[in-house]
Image (tube, rainbow, N blue to C red):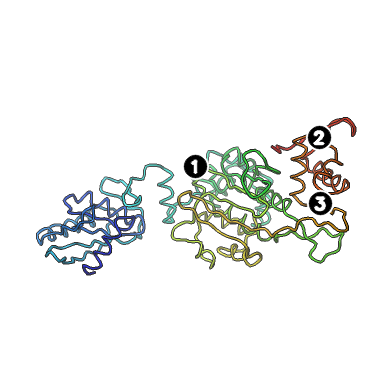
Amino acid sequence: MNRDEILKLVALNEDSVRQFKADVHNAVSLASEMAAFANAEGGVILIGVADNGSIPGLSLEDVSRINQLISNAASQLVRSPLVVQTENVAMENGRIVIVLTVPKGIDKPYFDKNGVIWLKCGADKRRVNSKEELRRLFQMTDQFHADELPTKAGIEALDKLRFRDFLRDSYKRDFPEDPAELTRMLKNMNLATDEGMLNLAAVLMFAERPEWILPQFVVKAIRYPGNKIHGTVYVDTEDFTGPLRKVFDDSLAFVMRNLHKVQAGRGVNSPGLPEVPETVFEELLVNALVHRDYLVSAPIRLFVYDNRIEIVSPGHLPNNLTVEKILTGNSNIRNPILVSYVAKGLLPYHGLGSGIKRALDAWPKINFADDHEGCLFTATVHRPLVEEPKVVSGSPISSPISSPKTEVQILELIRQDAFVTTSAIGKSLGITKRAVLKQVDKLKAQGYLRRVGPARGGYWEVLGGQG
């Protein structure tokens, strides 16, 4: 590195990979700075450069002293010891700047001599001060995984029928009736701790009521009218709980019932095909359930709008993964126990790193957003445009019976006037009374609407938390 390159670095100011120090006297403090860089992506410390960007530089005596201090700090005051590089660069004023390069650590986490773990936080550093942060740091280095966390549930929390069927289908083994034998089996299967308590993976997959033990790990789904979040107005909403397979099945069913059906050249009496292939949501939901960050105490959220469907998973992409990398099939196993069991048939899982590619092959109109600050990963499936109803020979033609848009409009009219007639609804929406009756029958069958009292003199009531 030459002085022109030094000047370019100084002009960029300090950030998470670059730091300035006018001088160094405290080896312990320098060791904490190096540990923070090593626990992140590595970085450069320019010694002889002040915080304000001026370059006072160092004397030859300073350089000799500081290089010895650097060596002691890296080898004796950081655990595990670090291998760092230094380069002395002469500046125009005859002074010297030391370029101290700290590589990204391969044995994370790194501690200072007091046992403190430091992390970079922008241009500064901070201590790891919570169990969750510590767990995540160990998770990033494959020394710990969230799905092996112990829970407070014992073997009595198992869904015996579900676990029995899994043992029979996957291992050709019978369910052990003896509690001690069952506990040993669960330990050997990496589903229980040494103390005999179920771990997180076991609860998620095989507990009878996982939500009683881990209430935060559910899927919350909602269907909004239009393309924005509404505070109180929605068409359909539900929380999906239970073992992982049930959560998957129920979430997928929610999406499919809120999609339009298209004939696609089929006969008029055929059920039609979903506007977006079902396999797309199979792959994305499996990905969300299996690869989400279970160190974040939050549910997966499923939002259905008129023009898109969003699956929002807690946790950004782990380690050095980016959206670009996952699109090419790269992956990182965040929950290896879940992955190993899901691959045995618990969910329609087809291999690590291939789910997103399969979803894109089936439906290219998908975007992914990795939000590190918000600690979220979002998959957005864009829906095709739906043609508006057309008028032929002066007669209105209703939108398809399965159109959620028409259902929303009917429910909204009933909210405004519980005594509204089907004829008035049809006139307001520009569709036939017969079309309204078909939509009303469907809403009643789905549990969203009921009639109170007789056809004449009675009124409508919106059900199912319809806002």
The residue identified by callout 1 is 195
Residue type at the position of mark 3 = Ile
- Which residue is located at x 35 percent, y 58 percent? 107
Disc 3 on helix, strand or loop? loop
- Which residue is located at x 18 percent, y 49 percent? 26
Is 380 drawn above or below residue 211 in the view shown?
below
Going by the image, does 292 lie left or right of 431?
left
Quadrant in the picture for the N terminus:
bottom left
Q: Position of residue 284 (x, y in %)?
A: 61, 57
Quadrant in the picture for the C terminus:
top right
Q: Position of residue 312 (x, y in %)?
A: 57, 51
Q: Position of residue 421 (x, y in %)?
A: 85, 38
Residue type at the position of mark 2 = Trp
The residue identified by callout 2 is 460
Farthest bottom residue? 2
Tell me whether the residue at label 3 lies in contact with that at label 1, contact meaning CB atoms closer than 8 angstroms: no
